[in-house]
Image (cartoon, rainbow, N blue to C red):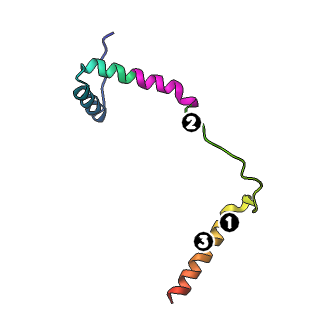
Amino acid sequence: MRTTVTLDPDVEAMLRKEVHRRGEPFKQVLNNAIRAGLRNKKRGDDAFDPITFDMGKPHLDLTKAASLASDLEDEELIDRYRRSR
């Protein structure tokens, strides 16, 4: 099938670089890149499988984690201020 496609300049540069590196025709490099991209898209849904583990019950009430972080930051800033005087 013959069609017209407008490539962004960065995409064209990547394709031309790949053409030069592989020594293959532009058409072949473009088709292979599209195939690879579409294949990876199908696999993309289950590609990320994070490693998880049970860390046990928290020792702090994590519903107020932002408040705790703020308090700890305030204490640190006060300590720095006192040390600099």
Horizontal side, residue 28 vs residue 76: left or right? left
Image point (45%, 23%), residue name: 38
| Image: magenta residue range | 35-46
Image point (25%, 31%), residue name: 17
Q: Position of residue 28 (x, y in %)?
A: 30, 18
SS for dot 3: helix
Image point (31%, 14%), residue name: 3
Horizontal side, residue 42 vs residue 24: left or right? right
Horizontal side, residue 39 vs residue 64: left or right? left
Number of other residues with Cα within 10 Å of mark 3, as a class: few under 14, some 14 to 19, many 20 or more: few
SS for dot 1: helix
Indicate which label's residue lies in the foreground, 2 or 3: 2
Q: Is 39 in the magenta?
A: yes
| Amino acid under disc 1 | Ser
Residue 48: which disc? 2
Instruction: Looking at the image, tell me whether mark 1 or mark 3 is earlier in sequence order.
Output: 1
Disc 1: which residue: 67
Residue 23: which disc? none
Number of other residues with Cα within 10 Å of mark 1, as a class: few under 14, some 14 to 19, many 20 or more: few
In the rendered view, tell whether residue 36 sits above or below residue 55: above
Disc 3: which residue: 73
| Amino acid under disc 3 | Glu
Q: Which of 49 and 75 is in front in this view?
A: 49
| Amino acid under disc 2 | Phe
Query: Hey, which residue is sitting farthest bottom in the picture?
Result: 85
Name the chief secondary structure element in magenta.
helix
Q: Position of residue 71 (x, y in %)?
A: 65, 71
SS for dot 2: loop
Number of other residues with Cα within 10 Å of mark 2, as a class: few under 14, some 14 to 19, many 20 or more: few
